[in-house]
Image (tube, grey):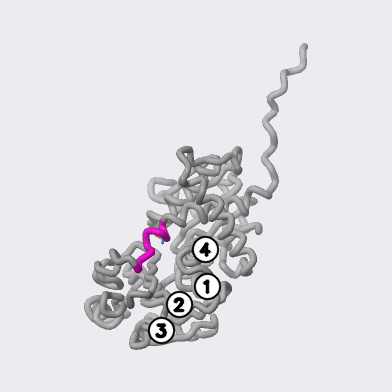
Amino acid sequence: MRHLISIEDLDREAIERIVAQAQRFAEVSDREIKKVPALRGRMVLNLFYEASTRTRSSFELAAKRLSADVVNFASSGSSVEKGESLKDTILTLSAHKPDAIVIRTPWAGAAELVSGWTSAAIVNAGDGKHEHPTQALLDVYTLTRRVGTLDGANIWIVGDVAHSRVARSNILAFQKMGAKVTVAGPPTLIPRGIEALGCEVRYRLDDLGEADVVYALRMQKERMTEAWVPSMREYATWYQINGRRLGSRQVLMHPGPVNRGIELSGEVVDSPQAVITAQVEAGVVVRMAVLYELLAGARAPEPADDREPMPA
Ligand code: CP
């Protein structure tokens, strides 16, 4: 694997390999010294053009636990504010010879574009509404630990599918792992033609009880340029996952950050069915596995020339 831009880059075998590697790294996270030398001498550049708490902190921790050197770059406070383009920023930062660039942007397709401008391995940490492949991998990891195999599992993804990169990556990843996926939400927030990805579509939650797993999505107000629902209160009335809608045997997931009281009620966020904190925890070990997969087998850095100089 050269880059991780889309879940389409991975087949089931590759997903299972990353999940198995993440399980091995979970043991490292339980140690007092949470570090292995697997990527010593490699450099990981985290390039974030968009807000992030979970993804950014877990990629940084993942790279550090593998002993890589880490450079964190946020667009605010950088020369991007003086008008430097994405391409010029990548060419500039590539002069530092990073082995991997982890990139989040609000622009669909940006990670793919960047892969053509640098020799570093590219990890898509979310590109607009397009994809968020490491979120899907950590969700597969979390669910596998909770329910065992995903073969035959019935997973409902509920809410703002239209603006969600997580929905697209997770529909693909869950199906590759053998699950049946249904997307549900108001018609304005379900993209036309999404059935082409192989999922079913529902516009009401009457049959939510069929689901083994309920995966709620955040209402992405920052990506809504017009009124997609009459009001957040109306949305919550029809689509909020709450104690009345969530069954006691169902697993509840959410990628975070959660809008408490909108897509999820506070009681279900704090319920034993919720694995939201486990998803965050999985982020570090799964991202360690992704960086390891991309870099450990790749070309080793040139050894430092520490020989004694020739005598004059
Ligand atoms: N799930 C997720 O991508 O969260 P952040 O935006 O906090 O990284």
Q: SS for tag 1?
A: loop
Question: Mark 3 or mark 1, which is nearer the start of the sequence?
Answer: 1
- The residue located at (54%, 80%) in the rendering is 197
Q: Residue 127: x percent and y percent?
A: 48, 64
Mark 2, other Cα within 10 Å: few <14 / some 14–19 / many ≥20: many
Q: Name the residue carrying label 1.
A: 150
Q: Nearer the viewer, mark 2 or mark 1?
A: 1
Q: Amino acid at mark 4?
A: Leu
Which element carries disc 3, helix, strand or loop?
A: helix
Residue depth check, mark 4 versus mark 3: number of the one nearer the observer: 3
Q: Nearer the viewer, mark 2 or mark 4?
A: 2
Crowdedness near tag 4: few (<14), some (14–19) or many (≥20) residues, C-alpha within 10 Å: many
Q: Amino acid at mark 2?
A: Ile
Q: In the drawing, what numbered circle is on residue 210?
A: 3
Ligand 1 in which quarter: bottom left
Looking at mark 2, is its residue's CB closer than 8 Å to ligand 1?
A: no
Residue depicted at x 44% and y 86%: 201
Quadrant of the drawing holding the C terminus: top right
Magenta-drawn segment = 273-280
Task: Say which residue label 4 marks.
Answer: 137
Which residue ends up furthest to the top in the rendered image? 312
Q: Which is nearer the N-term, disc 4 or disc 1?
A: 4
- Check contact, mark 2 vs mark 1: CB within 8 A: yes
Residue identified by numbered label 2? 155
**Amino acid type, residue under disc 3 in the picture:** Glu
Using the rendered view, name the quadrant where residue 255 is placed. Answer: bottom left
| N-terminal label among 2 and 3 | 2
Q: The residue tagged with tag 2: helix, strand or loop?
A: strand
